[in-house]
Structure formats: structure tokens, C-alpha cells
Image (spheres, rainbow, N blue to C red):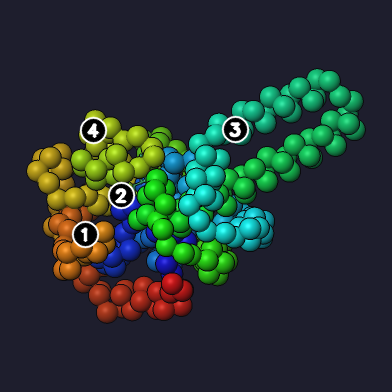
């Protein structure tokens, strides 16, 4: 199926190449730089454990709400489903406000426990918990709209295209079903990889590309590319990384398998028909395993796409 959102650097066009190169067997699938989760959404759930991660808290919260609170999210989205520059600016301001963090909730609960009797505390606790969840849903709805209304899904400028948000509701439903058993995380890649690494793990890593790091709300520094390589170097499991094809990345991963691939560049394609974008797939295992069985494996993924393709 398609993702619930478009995302800068989303791997819709590259994912069939990635499926063909995945290890034939793995017990846990971990999408380290989740973004729109295009690779995850297009693959059958399969593995014993599946993890979606992104360090962007709004993105992880959106995925969590789609998975766990689809009713509340749809209700929130359906409330005043306008689409105009003014609403876009209001949503942006709302998301820029200081977050209602779990730290704040913990303090409120502690205060209530110290100052109230047992039954009173239980009553207030239920209200505080409910409000905290509703805040998550409100934030998820605002973020979802911001992505949908912005230019190129970049969340920064208004896209100026009329769009009825209700047209996306079926995606939220099918997304919720697809994410039913997926663990959603909001961690820096290094902590995540160390936490989930096992010899039966498979990590798909799609970091911000070299010299386009600034396209994301979460800061990714130049030295983070080397930190990622060093973290992956210590892995027991298998991993596949996608990057733009450039000298720096080729040198950084010179001890691993590097395959050049290319795909249509979605944004450039708008202005330059036929524009292709050179990328590399880097791995610590033999990616031709699955391709040797190509008729059966591709058939399976194609079938999933047919079942779920909704956009
Ligand atoms: C190229 S995008 C991933 C696109 C995704 N594969 C898709 O198909 O939509 C890179 C993502 O990495 C996330 N990111 C940036 N720094 C990170 C970090 N230190 N740890 C985990 N995720 C990070 C960004 O928020 C962004 O969503």
C-alpha cells in the first residue's frame, strides 16, 4: 500500500528495488529513518517484529495516533476541514508552540498525588491522561494537515492547491490496520540500532542525503554520516542503506557492498521531464540472494501492492 503521507526523500520510486535486495529471511525489520515509511507500508508485515522510527517527534506521534487512535484522529481532522493559507499558518504556529511533553504530565500527576486524597487523585489522573492523549491527537491532526497543505510536503510553505483532507481518510484506516503490530519509536538512530540489534535483525536506513541534510526539521550534522557508518559497523544484524551517489559516501562505505541505482527525481521531474537521480544501495550482506528467486519473491510483493494500493 502507499504511505499515509508524502515526505521529502520518500522512497516510493525506489522501494521495489529495495524489496528485491532485502535478505531472504529476517526475524525483525527495523526502519531506522522512517519518514513517510514508504518501504514499510509497501512490504507485507511478515517479520516477527517490525519497528518504525523517526527522530522527528511530530512524525512519530502521527504514526502512533494513526495506529492507536484512528477514530479520534479522523474526528479531529473532520472538524473544520478547511484548506487555505490562513489555516496553514495557524497550524504551523500551533505546532511551533512548546510541546505538551510527558515530563509535564509526570509533574502534574506527582503534584496531584501529593495534594489529593486517593479517590480524588484517581479522578484527576483519568482526566489528565485523557487530555494528554487528546493533545497527541490534536497535534497529529495539525501535523497531518500541515504536510498535506504544504508545498512538496516540506511543511514550510503553503502549497496553494485546494485539497479536501477527507479524501485521505481511507488511507488513515488502511494505515491503522497495516501498523497494528508495528512498534513506533522516536529515537536517534544510534540508540535505536543498538537497542534492536540481533543477528536476525534487518535494518533499512534512509538517512538525510549528503549535503541535503537541511531539508528536515530534525538536525542531521555532517559528522552524523560517519556516526551512522560506525554504528552500523558494529551491528550483528544485516543492514541496507540508501544514499545519494557521491564520492564522500562511497569513501565512507568503501568496505561494504555498494550498488549504483537510479530513479526518477520527483521534484526535479516537475521541471525537467525524464530527470533521473543517481543513488547507491549499500549493504553488509549479499543483496543478490532474493533476486535469484525473483519470480516468486516479486510476485508476493506485487500482490501486496495490488491489495493495498489506494492512492
Ligand atoms: C530521507 S528521510 C526518510 C524517508 C523515508 N524512507 C520515506 O520513504 O518516507 C530521512 C528521515 O530521517 C529522519 N532523521 C533525521 N535525523 C535522524 C536521527 N538522528 N535519527 C533518526 N531519524 C532521523 C528525518 O526526520 C527524516 O524523516
- The quadrant of the picture occupied by the C terminus is bottom left
Q: CA distance from mark 1 to mark 3?
A: 38 Å
Mark linked to residue 302: none
Q: Nearer the viewer, mark 1 or mark 3?
A: 1
Mark linked to residue 268: 1
- Name the foreground residue: 122 vs 48: 122
The disc, 2 or 1, on the residue closer to the chain's N-terminal end is: 2
Q: Position of residue 95 (x, y in %)?
A: 52, 40
Mark linked to residue 101: 3
Q: Residue at x 52, y 66 (%)?
A: 164
Q: Position of residue 236 (x, y in %)?
A: 32, 43
- Name the foreground residue: 87 vs 238: 87
Q: CA distance from mark 2 to mark 1?
A: 20 Å
The disc, 1 or 3, on the residue closer to the chain's N-terminal end is: 3
- Does label 1 point to a residue whose CB lies under 8 Å from ligand 1? no
- The quadrant of the picture occupied by the N terminus is bottom left
Q: CA distance from mark 1 to mark 4?
A: 24 Å
Number of other residues with Cα within 10 Å of mark 4, as a class: few under 14, some 14 to 19, many 20 or more: few
**Label 3 element class:** loop
Q: Residue at x 61, y 28 (%)?
A: 103
The disc, 2 or 4, on the residue closer to the chain's N-terminal end is: 2
**Is 12 left or right of 176, judged from the image as shown?**
left
**Which residue does the numbered mark 2 point to in the structure image?**
206
**Label 2 element class:** loop
210 in relation to 85, above or below: above
Q: CA distance from mark 4 to mark 3?
A: 29 Å
**Which residue does the numbered mark 4 point to in the structure image?**
222
The disc, 1 or 4, on the residue closer to the chain's N-terminal end is: 4
Q: Position of residue 6 (x, y in %)?
A: 40, 59
Number of other residues with Cα within 10 Å of mark 2, as a class: few under 14, some 14 to 19, many 20 or more: many
Amino acid at each position: 500500500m502507499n504511505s499515509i503521507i508524502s515526505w521529502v526523500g520518500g522512497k516510493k520510486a525506489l522501494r521495489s528495488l529495495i524489496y528485491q535486495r532485502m535478505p531472504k529471511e529476517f526475524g525483525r525489520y527495523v526502519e531506522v529513518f522512517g519518514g513517510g515509511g514508504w518501504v514499510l507500508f509497501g512490504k507485507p508485515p511478515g517479520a516477527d517484529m517490525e519497528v518504525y522510527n523517526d527522530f522527528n517527534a511530530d512524525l512519530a506521534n502521527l504514526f502512533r495516533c494513526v495506529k492507536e487512535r484512528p477514530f479520534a484522529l479522523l474526528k479531529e481532522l473532520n472538524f473544520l476541514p478547511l484548506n487555505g493559507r490562513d489555516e496553514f499558518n495557524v497550524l504551523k504556529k500551533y505546532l511551533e508552540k512548546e510541546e505538551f511533553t510527558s515530563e509535564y504530565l509526570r509533574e502534574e500527576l506527582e503534584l496531584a498525588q501529593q495534594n489529593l486524597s486517593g479517590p480524588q487523585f484517581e479522578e484527576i489522573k483519568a482526566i489528565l491522561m485523557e487530555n494528554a492523549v487528546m493533545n497527541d491527537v490534536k497535534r497529529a491532526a495539525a501535523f497531518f494537515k500541515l504536510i498535506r497543505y504544504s508545498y512538496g510536503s516540506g511543511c514550510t510553505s503553503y502549497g496553494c492547491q485546494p485539497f479536501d483532507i477527507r479524501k485521505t481518510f481511507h488511507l488513515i484506516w488502511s494505515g491503522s490496520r497495516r501498523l497494528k503490530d508495528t512498534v513506533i519509536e522516536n529515537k536517534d538512530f544510534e540508540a535505536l540500532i543498538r537497542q534492536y540489534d540481533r543477528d536476525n535483525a534487518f535494518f533499512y536506513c534512509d538517512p538525510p542525503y549528503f549535503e541535503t541534510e537541511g531539508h528536515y526539521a530534525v538536525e542531521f550534522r555532517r559528522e552524523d554520516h560517519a556516526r551512522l557508518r560506525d554504528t552500523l559497523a558494529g551491528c550483528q544484524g544485516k543492514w541496507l542503506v540508501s544514499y545519494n551517489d557521491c564520492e564522500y559516501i562511497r569513501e565512507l562505505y568503501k568496505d561494504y557492498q555498494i550498488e549504483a541505482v537510479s530513479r526518477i527525481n520527483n521534484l526535479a521531474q516537475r521541471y525537467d521531464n525524464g530527470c533521473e537521480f543517481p543513488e547507491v544501495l549499500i549493504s553488509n550482506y549479499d543483496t543478490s540472494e532474493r533476486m535469484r528467486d525473483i519470480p516468486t519473491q516479486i510476485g508476493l510483493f506485487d500482490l501486496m501492492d495490488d491489495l493495498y494500493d489506494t492512492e
